[in-house]
Each structure stands twice: as C-alpha cells, then as structure tokens.
Amino acid sequence: MKAIIKHEKVELENRFALLGGKMVYQGGSMAKRGGFPGGMPGGNMNQMLKQAQKMQRDMQKAQEELAQKEVEASVGGGAVVARANGAKQILSIKVNPEVLDPEDVETLEDMLLSAVNQVLDSVDELANSSMSKITGGMGIPGLF
C-alpha cells in the first residue's frame, strides 16, 4: 500500500510544480495521450477551445448585425404600429389619429401594449433564428 502512495506522489510531483505558492499543472502522460480517462470523446481540449472561441466570435458578430435590424408590428388594422431593433430598443410607436378617443383610453392602451409585445416577440424570434445558425440549434439557456 505504501509503494502505491509513493508512486502516486512521484507522478504528481512530475506533473505539478509549486509556483508562487500555487500548484501549477505542467503536463504529463495523460496530456500527451490526448486527454484524461473518461473525458470528452476525442480528448482534444485545444480543438474544443478553438471551436468555442470561434462560436463566441460568431455570436458577437451576429449580435452586432442583429442590433442593426429593425422589426415592425401592427395592431388594430394599422391603428398602432411599433418598431424595434434587434437590441430590443423600441424605435417608434405610431398611432393613427382616428383611434384617439378621449372616452376610450383603455382601448388605445391595450393596442399600444399589444403592438409593443408583438414587436418584442418578433425580435426574439429573429434573435433565436440568428443564434441557432451559430449554435446548431443547441438552445443554450440565457443566450437571449
């Protein structure tokens, strides 16, 4: 039993070094074999890191492009029209003067809410479509 522990200690000493009071990994036979036992298929962490970095760059570019796009929603047969950009900023709300009735403010309020909600839903759909092209439809939670 002592021989095994001593052997493991030697292995660890070969792969780790103490630098500035912190243990630092210096490689070893597992890294040379392409990964740790039971790890990711293929075991190529560098390749996975490169893919993740590329995906991150692509997502950043898509977000920038998305912010430049505009979406419009109309309710009440065009009585209220809301416009937003891909960054979920409301750009404008147009109200047809014919629907302005001081006696029926609630209807106008409902149409305004509906137009804004619809335009923001359209932005979400646009963003999801754009990001799914990059992520391959993985559906990463909290992405948008």
Image (cartoon, helix red, strand yellow):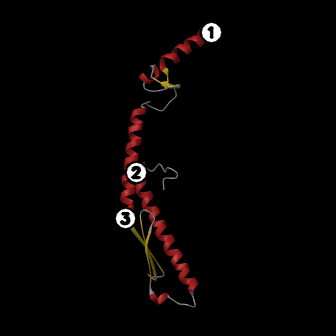
* Extreme residue toward the right, this view: 1
Quadrant location of residue 93? Answer: bottom left
Residue on which disc 2 sits: 59
Above or below residue 24? Residue 88 is: below
Mark 1 sits on what residue? 2
Label 2 or label 1, whichever comes before in sequence order: 1
Q: What is the CA distance from the residue labelled 3 to the residue labelled 1?
A: 67 Å
Residue under the point 39% across and 42% down: 53
Total marks in image: 3
Question: Considering the image in quadrants, where does the N terminus appear?
Answer: top right
> Label 2 vs label 1: CA separation?
52 Å
* Residue type, numbered disc 2: Met
Identify the residue at horizontal 48%, vertical 16% (top origin). Answer: 14
Relative to 10, say whether 115 is above or below.
below
132 over 24 or under it: above or below: below
Q: CA distance from mark 3 to mark 2?
A: 15 Å
* Secondary structure type for disc 2: helix
- State left or right for residue 105 relative to residue 95: right
Neighbourhood count class around disc 2 (C-alpha, 10 Å): few under 14, some 14–19, many 20 upward: some
The mark nearer the N terminus, 3 or 1, is 1
Q: Residue 2's quadrant in the figure?
A: top right
How many residues crowd mark 1 within 10 Å: few (<14), some (14–19), many (20+)? few
Q: Position of residue 129 (x, y in %)?
A: 42, 58
The residue indicated by pointer 3 is 69
Give me the residue at 49% from left, 75% from top.
Answer: 115
Secondary structure under badge 1?
helix
Q: Secondary structure at mark 3?
A: loop
Q: Amino acid at mark 3?
A: Lys
Residue drawn at x 49%, y 87% as measured from the top left? 99
Label 1 is placed on what type of residue? Answer: Lys
Q: Is residue 79 above or below residue 54?
A: below
The numbered mark, 3 or 2, whose residue comes first in the sequence reads: 2
